[in-house]
Every structure is written in structure tokens, then in C-alpha cells.
Amino acid sequence: MRTVFLAVALAALSSHAQAGPRLPASGLYCPIGVDVPPISVDGRGGLGIDLLDCARVSLSRGRARSEVCFGNGGAQVTLDTDLAVHRDGTLRHDGVAFRLYTGPRPCPAP
């Protein structure tokens, strides 16, 4: 019985470890103190960043990557940019801090 429990626990831990860092909580992240476009995170692994809509985004070592992003006019591009998720839930991108915003859209003016 103990062996079965350990095997199941190890399998769960290893699959979680292989998944890599997850995207932050879903929602709109507004820049703090500067006028730059916000970052949006959806619950399906999508990210709106740098005026791109990206699907299947992965985070690794402070980088956000996606093979499928759409820009204005429908242009398809890839994404490889800096994005750090801090313990308090704030994001940092291009030297700017972003905080989850729960008020009415759009983000308030800085």
C-alpha cells in the first residue's frame, strides 16, 4: 500500500515539475506609473502583451514564449520577450511593473 502511494505521489510531482511555471492569474494587469499598454492573461494559456494576442504561452526563466501570436491587421508572429512573475502577483516586463486590476476597463491613467 505504501509503495502504491509513493508511486502515485512521485508521478504527480514529476508531471507538475515538467509542466514548468504557469502564467499568472487571469485578468488585466495595468502598468504602474507609466503609460504603456496593459497585459492581459486568460485562463486558457493566452497572453495579450506588446499589442499582440498570443496563444499557448510558456514561461521559463523570466521569458514568455509563443509560436502563435497575432498583431494588428492579423499578422502572425512569434513571441519571445521578458516577463517576470513576482511572489506578490505583480508582473515585470520591459522594466515596468504591472498589477492585477479588477476595476472597470480600461486601466486608469497613470
Image (cartoon, grey):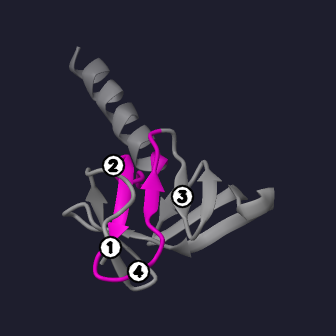
The span shown in magenta is 19-43
- Image height of 4 relative to 28, above or below: above
Q: Which of label 3 and label 4 is nearer to you?
A: 4
Task: Identify the mark nearer the N-term, 2 or 3.
Answer: 2
Report crowding for label 2: few under 14, some 14 to 19, many 20 or more residues within 10 A (C-alpha).
some
Q: Which mark is residue 35?
A: 4
Q: Is residue 30 left or right of residue 36?
A: left
Q: Which residue is painted at 36% across and 33% down in the image? A: 12
How far apart are labels 4 and 1 at the CA level?
7 Å
Distance CA(mark 3)–CA(mark 4): 16 Å
Q: Residues within 10 Å of mark 4 (few under 14, many from 20)?
A: few
Circle 3 sits on which residue? Answer: 48
For the point 30% across and 19% down, which residue is it? 4
Q: Which residue in the structure is indicated by mark 2?
A: 25
Q: Toward which corner of the image does residue 85 lie, by quadrant?
A: bottom left
Residue under label 1: 109
Q: Amino acid at mark 2?
A: Ala
> Closer to the camera: disc 3 or disc 1?
1
| Helix, strand or loop for disc 1 | loop
Q: Nearer the viewer, residue 78 or 27?
A: 27
Q: Secondary structure at mark 4?
A: loop
The nearer-to-camera label among 4 and 2 is: 4
Query: Could you tell me how far apart the alpha carbons at marks 4 and 2 are, in whole angstroms?
Result: 22 Å
Q: Tell me how far mark 3 sits from mark 1, CA to CA.
A: 19 Å
Against 95, residue 32 (above or below) is above
For the residues marked 2 and 3, what is the alpha-carbon distance in whole angstroms? Answer: 13 Å
**Residue 87, position in %: x, y?**
22, 64
User: Badges 4 and 1: C-beta atoms under 8 Å apart?
Assistant: yes
40 inside magenta stretch: yes
